Amino acid sequence: MYYCHCRYSMKVYYQFNSLPVIKNAIVTQGTFDGVHAAHQVILKRLKQLAKLQNGETVVMTFDPHPRMVLYPNNHGLNLLHTLDEKIDALDKEGIDHLIVIPFTKEFSRLSSLQFIRDIIVNKIGVNTLVIGYDHRFGKNREGTFEHLKEFSGLYGFEVEEIPEQDIEEVAVSSTRIRKSLTEGNVQLANKYLGYKYAITGTVQQGKQLGRTIGFPTANMDINDPLKLIPADGVYAVQVVFNNNMYGGMLNAGYRPTVNGKTHSIEVHLFDFNQDIYNLQIEIRYVDKLRDEMKFDGLTELKNQLEKDKLHATAVLQYAGK
């Protein structure tokens, strides 16, 4: 099946049988969770080569994430991107073709030779393959850059490895970004990502306690249960709704001041009074303000929220888009 959403200029495919003939295919492959700063270097090189060789860029990715198939009961993984977010990010990078490979146990048993010969060469018709540093593929991750160099001569394609990408002498990876987010260090995560980490959800009606102290909140129902939510606490955020961006502050946690029993994600939008129940909004994390705390009553909570708002406003003044 071939799928192309009208908002994308990139063509998206979910099976190889639907692939057209791709001219001088400049190919990369990987999970691309987060499409972070190191991924962006690979994609930039892909586009440079396509321009030089009068070719087209091709990204191969997997859904679901391979670890979720190989270790279904203990993968311990939350994702930086939903599939839709990944598609959107790759489209914004200006990629021509995206192939979403359904990752199954059967697919995981392909040897590195089978993967190169049957998919990269025979299905896609690769001209040049670009991979990230220390990239592995095939059964038991046996495939290496050396495998690719060995087979590239046999099957007539070029292969290029992009060096490890460091930011402040730390290698950028999806794993490091997940760790930063789970520790609440969204500024560091954003530096590694090259953009602000975002979650998307639908606004649900809550108990409306915030209204009683002058801080009405939108209660978020996150669209994908596998989406990584940063550590509990209070954050300065940007909220995108109906193509407009608003400043705000978000609280994630159990609302101990009012003896909350369930986990919630609530966002207060500054200078905003529209009804957005049952509508979808995007929240971009800018910086963590503090941990969630228990206060002695709503008056003390309100006083702290006033301070948080001043802090958040100052942070957002320099946040950019």
Image: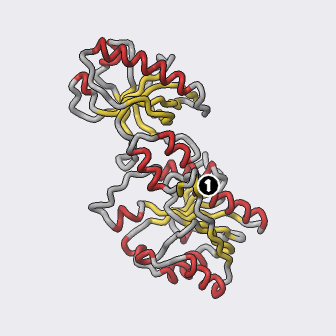
Is 118 drawn above or below residue 12 in the view shown? Answer: below
Q: Quarter-wise, where is residue 109 in the image?
A: bottom left
Q: Is residue 68 left or right of residue 237?
A: left
Visible residue check, residue 280 = yes
Q: Is residue 310 left or right of residue 208?
A: right
How many badges with numbers are in the image? 1
Q: Where is residue 131 shown, x and y percent of the image?
A: 59, 68
Q: Quarter-wise, where is residue 50 in the image?
A: bottom right
Residue at 37 percent of width and 50 percent of height: 226
Residue in the foreground of this view, choosing between 121 and 247: 247
Residue in the foreground of this view, choosing between 78 and 182: 182
Colouring chosen for the image of the structure = secondary structure
Residue denoted by label 1: 40
Could you classify mark 1 by the number of other residues whose Cα lies within 10 Å: few (under 14), some (14-19), or many (20 or more)? some
The amino acid sitting under disc 1 is Gln
Q: Is residue 26 left or right of residue 137?
A: right
Is 134 drawn above or below residue 262 in the view shown? Answer: below
Residue at 38 percent of width and 75 percent of height: 106
SS for dot 1: helix
Q: Where is residue 154 shown, x and y percent of the image?
A: 64, 88
- In what quadrant of the picture does the C terminus appear? top right
Residue at 43 percent of width and 29 percent of height: 289
Visible residue check, residue 1 = no
Q: Where is residue 91 shown, x and y percent of the image?
A: 61, 51
Residue at 47 percent of width and 29 percent of height: 236
Farthest residue, direction bottom: 154
Farthest residue, direction front: 169
Q: Where is residue 89 shown, x and y percent of the image?
A: 57, 49
